[in-house]
Every structure is written in C-alpha cells, then in structure tokens.
Image (tube, rainbow, N blue to C red):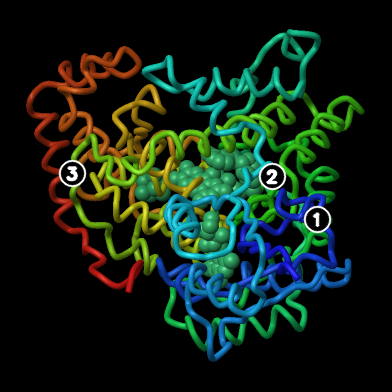
Amino acid sequence: MPGPVLVPILGDQLTRTLASLRGRAKDDTIVLMMEVSDEATYVRHHKQKIVLVFSAMRHFAEELRDAGWTVDYVKLDDPDNAGSFTGEVARAIERHAPRLVSVVEAGEWRIRHDMEEWADKFASEIEILRDGRFICAQAEFDEWAESRDTLRMEYFYREMRRKTGLLMDGDRPEGGEWNYDSENRKPPKDGLSAPERPKFEPDETTRGVIELVADRFGDHFGSLESFQWPVTRDEAEEAADAFFAERIECFGPYQDAMVAGEDDLFHSMLSTSINLGLLDPLELCQRAENAYRDGKAPLNSVEGFIRQIIGWREYVRGFYWHQMPQLQKANALNAQRSLPEFYWTGETDMACLADCIRSTRDNAHAHHIQRLMVLGNFCLLAGISPREVQDWYLVVYADAYEWVELPNVAAMILYADGGTMASKPYAASGNHINKMSNYCSGCKYSPHKKTGEGACPFNPLYWHFMHRHRERLEKNHRIGRIYATWDRMGERKQVEYLESAEVFLESLQPAGEGWARS
Ligand code: FAD
Ligand code: DLZ
Ligand code: SF4
C-alpha cells in the first residue's frame, strides 16, 4: 500500500484554499503542523507574535479537523519535538511513510533554502508548490524588474491595477488618476480619534498559549497582557467588517497622521491576519472597491487602501525575492552605529519615539507612518547599522516576516540598497513630525529650536545626515537642491548643527547584545 500525502502547513499558511490542500482527497492526506523552537527563537520575537502564531495555528488545526482533515499537530512542549521544520518533517516521514510530501513554498528565504534540501535528505518524493495567495508570481516580478535599473513601486502598482481590474474604468484608472496621495496627507486636527476596533478576548486555547509563552519566552520583548488579535478567520472577518463599516472613509486622509495614545487611528489593523493567511488580500481589495462603488467610501481612501495591498505588499514581496540574499547585507550608506537601548526600553525624552515604542511594546504594532517617519527616520538620520534595525523590526511587530520586513527596513527606511526602491532617502526633520502629529506639544524638546539645548534632535540630525552623504545625495535631482539651503546658512550655523548632532549622538546608550538574538 503506498503511503498517504503529507502536507506540512507552516504558521503563516493558515488558508483553507492553500495550494497544497486544493484537490486533495481527505482520506489520503495527513496535514502536518509544527510548533518548533527554531521559529520562536531565530530572533527573540515579541511575546504577542508567538502567541498569535501558535494560537492561530491551533485554531486552524481544529478548523481543518472539523472539516474532515486528519491533522498531525506537534506542540512545542512535545518531549520529542525536534525543534525545526526539517527535523519535524523527518519525524513525520518516519511516522506516516508518505508517498509524497507536498508543501507550499515558505515566505522567508531562510526556510525556503532548507526546504529545497528536503529532496536530497528524504526518501519520499517532495513537491514545493507556488504560494498562490499572492497576486504577482515571482517570475512575473522578475520579468518586470529585469529591464529596469530602479524598481519604482508606482509603475509596478499600475500593472497590478490592470491585471486585477481593480478601480479600472476600461483601460483608464477610475477617476482619471492612478494616485490620490495628495488628498491623503491631512495633519491630525485637534481631538482626532477613531472608532475603537473590535478586540478579541483570549479564549481557552489562546490562554493556554499565553501561559506557554510566558513560561518559555517570558524574557522576550513586549507585553502579553493586552493580547487581543484575531486568531481565527471568523474573528479576522469581524475585524475587516468593522474596518469597512467604520474606518475606511477616513483611512486615506489620515493615513499619515499620528496622535499620541491613538494607536490604531483609521488603519485597518489587518496585517497580522493577512500575513497569517486568515484573510485574502484580493478579497479585501474587492470589498474596498465595492465600498466605493456603493458610495460608502471616497475614492482617495479606497485607492489608498488598494495601493497598500496590491501595490506595496505585492511589490515588497517581489523585491525581497529579487534582491535576496544580498539585501540582508546591503549597507550603501555605510551605517555602523549601534541601535540605542531606548528602542527596547522606551526610555527617551523624545515624545514621538517614546509613544511609538510604547505602542510597539503594548500592541506588537505601530502604524505605517510611525514605523517610517519616526522610528525609521531616526535610524536613518542617526546612521544605525541596518543589521540591528532589521533585527529590531523583525522582533517587535506581530505582522513581521522577513519577506515584508526586510525590504521596508533596508530599502524603504534606510536606503541601504542605494536607491533601487526609493528615489531618495526618507529623511525628515522635527518640523515634519510636528506637522503630521501632536507629539511635539508634549515633548521636552522643541521642533522650532534648531540647535543646542532643547532643540528637537531630529533637526541637527537631519543636517548631519545630509552633510555626511553630500557626495552621494547632491547628484540626486529629488533631494540635491537642499544643499543650496545648507550652503546659504554659512559656516557658523553649519558648525552649530553638526556639533549639536555630534553631542546628541555621543549621548546615545547602545543596546548591546541579547535583545534581538540569544
Ligand atoms: P493599513 O495601514 O491598514 O494598510 C493596509 C494593508 O496594506 C496592511 O495590512 C498591509 O498588508 C499592507 N501594507 C501597507 N503598507 C505596506 C508596506 N509598506 N509593505 C507591505 N505591506 C503594506 N508590514 C507587515 O505586514 N510586516 C512587517 O514586518 C512590516 N514591517 C515594516 C517595517 C517598516 C520599516 C515599515 C515602514 C513598514 C512595515 N510594514 C510591515 C508595512 C506597514 O507598516 C504595515 O503593514 C501596517 O502598518 C500594518 O497595519 P495595518 O494593517 O493597519 O495597515
Ligand atoms: C513566526 C513563527 C513562529 C514564532 N513559530 C512558528 C512555528 O512554531 N511553527 C510554524 O509553522 N511557524 C511559525 N512561525 C511562522 C514561520 O516563521 C513562517 O512560516 C516562516 O517564516 C516561513 O515563512
Ligand atoms: Fe519628536 Fe522632536 Fe517633536 Fe520631540 S520635538 S516629539 S523629538 S519631533
């Protein structure tokens, strides 16, 4: 009798229509799910991320069983647990003697690399299937990228609009423009707040995982008390329903706004569910388009939301696979400084950074503009080593997987790829943060003070950065003109800026080893 088909499903593949399940006979298939210590510790993930993945995996296994599948589920505290995907697949092959192991390609390079060795390691036949949950196949991205020196998201996005037909009016973009970003940069008005999103109280399964994580990973970064993420498809759907009913209308205009203590604003807060596979990204975009067509949401908000998903999300994934493994080591600006300790402790007088780090610690989440304009901008200006910044972002967010984290960190915020993704570094001074947030009114520093005691550190750091990288950036037509302003300042002012920045940089306490990796 030939053995069954073994279908390993990884923690971010929790999708009922996954390619490896499609068309399979239930009585001839064993689904393998594995909680393994390697995945929980290759970086010291935020405790909420581990809870989220394990709880969602356990719920998904139950859902599959209820639907008639046989699931072999290996828990982390199984005494024989081999600790790695490869080790667990080896054990499962011994248990079930499958005629075929059918697995969907892993999202991360590290794991896909291991998977590619399974065919040599194991006697069973191995089949690695394409992950059909993405709209753009890698071959398609590579072909698009091949003829280009720079890979701008905007042009890729237009291709995805044409391919999916989303917000298209024949072969023209709906409303006549591809992009409504100019309507989507409203500063927060006083008292801006958003309807509260649904929060999901931990059920018995999640409570069990919380105990496990507190016991095994209690010294990892982040708080566990406030765990309220959706862990099933039904909960994720409820979260999406609430977004489309209550928040999408203002999603666009306030996309770049930040308000102290308002951790979600009008963002969808759906990235954790999308990345786990609980929600289908294309379906969400179709729902957004329907909201517009039904007159329930304005075009600028809906276009903005669809752009994030079929634009940015698809694009960074294509970019990751196109640029790996060299992207991990990219450091075009030769940034060498250590990450400051306050990124882990939150103890800083800079109110914007303190609030973003607090939200990160409490929720394992910060919204896009906080990750970009505050946390990322600081690392760019201060010249923090890309490796350390990458580790931090991979640890602290519940939605972090290397395929999406690394391009955003290395290329979008740090310009470490030398400009393949972004046409210029995303460098901003205190004025810009002040315009888009209410942080500065509660800060020890002033965004209006440029140098010396009490000056917002972003101000001198901005010019220190521009000065350090003059040779490279002066030639850049999108940013080069700024040097005319620098030159007009005169030497005394320039020295004040540079000295202020130096004093600040000297005062930074490096984090040291052990926070991100054991
Ligand atoms: P919304 O603002 O509601 O956006 C809708 C959806 O669009 C998101 O759920 C997400 O799926 C997608 N999206 C938006 N922006 C991006 C982007 N730049 N790249 C990819 N997808 C995007 N997102 C992750 O999912 N995982 C990460 O590890 C991650 N790391 C980031 C690191 C940095 C430095 C930056 C600047 C951004 C990062 N992002 C990451 C993108 C973005 O910040 C999050 O997707 C977003 O904050 C999630 O919250 P939300 O669901 O409310 O998003
Ligand atoms: C993030 C994560 C964690 C913490 N633990 C597991 C796990 O024990 N088992 C599992 O299947 N997946 C886990 N994941 C998600 C994986 O890291 C993710 O599937 C890989 O990065 C492949 O993309
Ligand atoms: Fe941040 Fe500067 Fe504003 Fe303080 S003054 S909140 S450091 S931008």
Label 3 residue SS: helix
Foreground of the two, 59 or 104: 104
Of the two numbered discs 3 and 2 in the rendering, the one whose residue sits closer to the viewer: 2
Amino acid at the residue labelled 2: Phe
Horizontally, residue 492 falls left or right of residue 17, namely left
| Disc 2 to disc 1: CB gap under 8 Å | no
Residue neighbourhood size for the residue with mark 1, other residues' Cα within 10 Å, grouped as few (<14), some (14–19), many (≥20): few
Residue found at x 28% / y 16%? 476
- The quarter of the picture where residue 165 lies is top right
Q: Which mark, residue 266?
A: 2
Residue at the farthest bottom position: 79
Quadrant location, the N terminus:
bottom right
Label 1 residue SS: loop
Q: Earlier in the sequence, mark 3 or mark 2?
A: 2
Horizontally, residue 435 falls left or right of residue 194, namely left
Horizontally, residue 518 falls left or right of residue 465, namely right
Q: Position of residue 473 (x, y in %)?
A: 23, 22
Of the two numbered discs 2 and 1 in the rendering, the one whose residue sits closer to the viewer: 1
Residue found at x 50% / y 57%? 119
Residue neighbourhood size for the residue with mark 3, other residues' Cα within 10 Å, grouped as few (<14), some (14–19), many (≥20): many
Q: Position of residue 148 (x, y in %)?
A: 41, 16
Vertically, is 204 above or below 497?
A: below
Q: CA distance from mark 2 to mark 1?
A: 40 Å
Q: Which mark, residue 24?
A: 1
Q: Position of residue 345 (x, y in %)?
A: 37, 69
Amino acid at the residue labelled 3: Ala
